Image: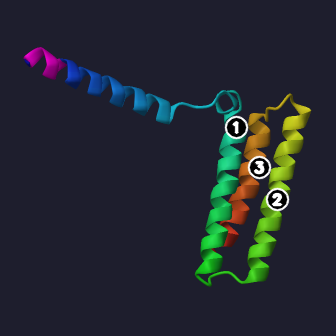
Amino acid sequence: MRILKVTIGLMGLALAAAAATSASAETTWQHNHPRRVEVNHRLANQNHRIAMERREGELTRAQAHTLRTQDRAIRAEERAYASQNGGHITRAEQRHLNRQLNTVSREIAH
């Protein structure tokens, strides 16, 4: 009986460890393109923030449209950089994109 309890406990621990590992695992694309992942994550986060501010009445429809247009331009620039460099963006390109994202971010919180 005791061996059965120990075995079940160990199986539970193994299952929990496997679930934690798979939940935090990156895809191959994320692993190979970390700079793009970071920039695209920021873009998605800003889009969410724009939607929340619009819903709360902090931004007008026109302001939200302008901010989303700026974000789309940044995303297009990120894709252009990546297409010129085998799917990757350089650190300098990432810094440039992040500066642009910071500007839009300040406008959202404005």
Residue 62 lies, in percent from the top left, at 79, 81
SS of the residue under disc 2 = helix
Residue 28 lies, in percent from the top left, at 66, 27
SS of the residue under disc 3 = helix
The magenta stretch is 2-6
Disc 3 from disc 1: Cα separation = 10 Å
Inspect the image, locate mark 3, and give the three-letter code of the amino acid beneath it.
Leu
Residue 83 lies, in percent from the top left, at 89, 36
In-image side of 11 versus 86 (left or right): left
Q: How crowded is mark 2: few (under 14 residues within 10 Å), some or many (20 or more)?
A: some
- Label number found at residue 35: 1
- Closer to the chain start, of discs 2 and 1, is 1
Disc 2 from disc 1: Cα separation = 17 Å
Inspect the image, locate mark 2, and give the three-letter code of the amino acid beneath it.
Arg
- Whether pointer 3 and pointer 2 mark residues with C-beta atoms closer than 8 Å, the reply is no
Quarter of the rendering occupied by the N terminus: top left
Q: How crowded is mark 3: few (under 14 residues within 10 Å), some or many (20 or more)?
A: some
Disc 3 from disc 2: Cα separation = 12 Å
SS of the residue under disc 1 = helix
On screen, 47 above or below 108? Answer: above
Inspect the image, locate mark 1, and give the three-letter code of the amino acid beneath it.
Arg
- Tag in front: 3 or 2: 2
Residue 94 lies, in percent from the top left, at 74, 42
- The residue at which mark 3 appears reads as 97
- The residue at which mark 2 appears reads as 72
- Tag in front: 3 or 1: 1
Rendered residue at 22%/23% (across/down): 8
Residue 1 covered by magenta stretch: no
